[in-house]
Each structure stands twice: as C-alpha cells, then as structure tokens.
Amino acid sequence: MRTNLATDALPSLLAKLAIPSLVALFASSLYSITDSIFLGKAVGELALAGLGYASPIQLFLVAFAQMFGAGSASVISRALGKQDEKRAGAAFSTALTALVLTVCSLALLFFLLPSLLLKGDNPAIQGQALAYLKILLPFTPLFCASTFLSAILRSEGKADKALLLLLLGNGLNIALDALFILKFGWGIKGAALATALGHTGACAYALSLILNKKLLLKPNKPDFQLLKQIVPLGLPSLVRQLGTTLVIATVNTLLIQTAGQAALASYTIINQLTMLAYLPLSALVMGFSPIAGFAYGASNKKRLRALIKLSLLLQIGIGLLLLAVFQLFSESLVGLFSSDKALVASTLPWVRIVLATIPFIGIQSLGAAYFQSIGKSIQSLLLWTGRQFLFLLPLVLAFSHLFGSKGLWFSFPLSDMLAVGLTIGLLIQEKKREFSLSDAR
C-alpha cells in the first residue's frame, strides 16, 4: 500500500512508519541483550559486569559507523533521487573507506593499550572486559561495517533488506551464543566471538547485495571531498552516541569505586532494560519525523499541530503503559538476565527509580525530532545531547560524590525531568517566535 505523507490519516500513517522502525530497532538491539542474557544466566555476575565494563569501547567504535552511515545515507539518497548514480557510488565508497580506516586505527590503539583504557579497582572485572575485547576488536571493521551498511540499505529505500540484515546477524549471534557459552563453556570469550561472527554474517549479506548488483547503488571511486558533506551531516549521530558512551563509562568507573562488582552487574542489566523501554518511544519519533518535515515544508501548520498533539498523547500513553509494565513486572524482567536472587533483589529498586520517568521521555525525544524536521539544527542537537552532557554527567558526578552509589541512581530520573523542562522551554520560545513573525507580516 502506498504511503502519502500529505493526505493519509495521521494515526494510520504514524503506525505505518513507526511499526517497521520498532521491529528494526528491536533487531539492532538484540546483540547486546542476547549476550547479557546468556552471560548472566549461564556464567554469572562477574561476566555480566565485565560485559558492561567493556561496552563503552564497543559503543565508541560504533558511533563512527553511525556517523558515516547517517551522513553518507543523506548524500546517497539525494544523489539517487537526482539519478546521479556516480555520486551515490562515490559517497558510499568514500564513507566506507573512511570508516574502515578510522575504526581500524582506533581498534589497534585499544588492542595495544587496553590496560590504559580500562583502568579500575577490580582486576577480575577488568580481566573479563579485556578477554571480551581481545576477541572482538580484530573484527571491528566488520561489526562497524554491518551498522554502516544497514543505513546505506535504508538510504535506497530497501528497509526490508536492512531489517533482514539485522535479523540475520542477530540470528547467528543467538545461535552461536548458545553453542559457545552453553555447550562449549567459553564464557565471555564465547559471547565476543558470537557477536563478531554475527556481524560478519550480516556484513557479508549486505556486500553480496551490492556486488551482485541487486541495488541501484554501485560502488565508485572514492571522492574524499565528499567528506565535507558526509561528516557534518553525520555529526549529530556521533555526538549523541559519544554522550551515551561517556555516561556509561563514567557510571561504570564510579560504581566500581563506590559499590563494586554487583552494582556494575546491576547497571549492565538496567542498561539493557532501559534500551528495551525506549524502543517504542524511539520508533514513534522515527515515524513522526518524516511526516513533520513534510507538513512543515508544505506550510501545512494545521496538520503539523495535529501531528504534534497526537504524537505527544501517544508518547505519554505508551510511556504510562511501559511505566506500569516495568514497575509491576520488574522482578521477572530483571530475572531474564540473572538467576542470582541476591543480584536480582539488589537491582530491583534501581530499575524502578531509573525508569520512573518513562512517560516524560517522549516529550524530549519529540521536541528534538521536531526541531530536526524543521531544520533547526542547533536546537535539535542541544536536545538530543543535552540530557547526557548538560544534566546527566554533572549530576552523576555530583550525586555520587555527595551521596555515594545510591545518589548516582537518582541522577537518572532527575536529568530526564531537567531535559524535558529544557524541551518545553525551547518549544515555547519557538511558538513565540512564530507569533512574532506572523505579527510582522
């Protein structure tokens, strides 16, 4: 069924765009969730803590894949729209080359100097993290390329193939986790190898589509002048992911210093559950963005206002439903990741606190997407990154110093509410500006 952004009823249009996005987001998040479940259930608290301690380096490398993927996807989609296949192919080759060179250099640095990058007061956790990274880092070009290639497939409108890529990689990861961890008993090393080979399979599938000429996109000679366009377009994705990486690394370090191994294992579980909780909210934002941009470009303010109102109501409604699920069934959800009753019991109160503000998170996400859709890049970047850099990091550092690890957990909901307040303030300011422009005319 063909989608018309200008005339389709907003509820059905949002559903058409958001539901496939939700499936894709869930598929892309399965790598870390699967590893956490297998390690937590089959190996234990130490392996779970080690996985969480290693995750910032993995996220840091993937941030560059997201940057080059988002930036080149924009250039490629516009070039294909103009039937300029040469430029599209050059943008693809340029971005892929730059990505491989960047992540290979960084991975080599991490591989040669891991002890400097994973300093901590717990040698056992550090040893688990290093064991994971030593297996994963040689596969860095492949696991970053699979993320990049997924964005490239979407840029050509091949959302189904992008989803298949994610499902293929995750299917391999799950099967190999079961084999390497449950049957062979390889522990965290098995989780790393399963993740690496899963991404390798996904990467091979995407490259086969390109090499067998099943896409409009055809690789061309790199033109590194195109990086002047690709990098700025992908920079918001990089900054946002780096903010998340920095928060996780900071919290990991503070928890090891103030609370120990069990607290870090709890944080690893909380991160996975937070990611799951945010998936429906993020999918709705992904459905909202193209409709909002189209309505704004068409100067259809009535449709844009109706879209914002509907999306806000849906975000708050979904958020309240998620809040109920995670408050009422938190013990069962945490239990997915561990059979250790003591760990589950110690994690429960912090899960409930960290996820207490879910109904309000959608306001901030929608505000950021709205400004991005109407071309207000400064406001958009401020909202996408403000929670991490302006609020969460300072609060985590201050509260952990003043109140210890217990204070650290309360910084999460407080930073959420401050980010929502910033969003509302910027939206009110934008509304006043619109009225001023109308009066001037």
Image (cartoon, grey):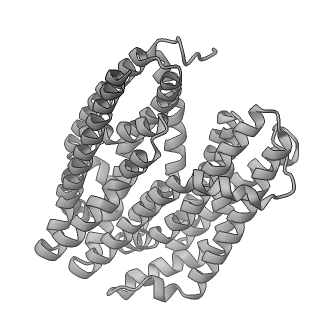
Query: Does residue 349 lie above or below 288 as drawn?
Result: below
On the question of residue 146 being in view, the answer is no
Residue 265 in the image: state x and y as whole percent: 32, 68
Is residue 10 visible in the rendered structure shown here?
yes
Is 256 drawn above or below residue 268 in the view shown?
A: below
Q: Nearer the viewer, residue 420 or 44?
A: 420
Taking depth in this image into account, of 221 and 260 the one nearest to the observer is 221
Task: State the residue at coordinates (41%, 35%).
Answer: 370
Q: Position of residue 59 (x, y in %)?
A: 50, 64
Residue drawn at the location 50% of the way across and 50% of the way down: 30
The quadrant holding residue 328 is top left
Q: Tell me: residue 161, above or below residue 230.
A: above
For the residue pair 296 and 364, the one nearer the viewer reads as 296
Comparing 73 with 299, the one in front is: 299
Where residue 127 sits: x, y (%)? 45, 84
Compared across the picture, whether 269 is left or right of 263 comes to: right
Residue beneath the point at 26% across and 78% down: 260
- Please state, as top left, top right, bottom left or bottom right, where the N terminus lies in the image: top right
Left or right of 432, for residue 76: right
State which quarter of the image contains the C terminus.
top left
Image side of residue 66 versus residue 73, left or right: left
Question: For the view shown, which residue lies furthest in the left direction?
Answer: 403
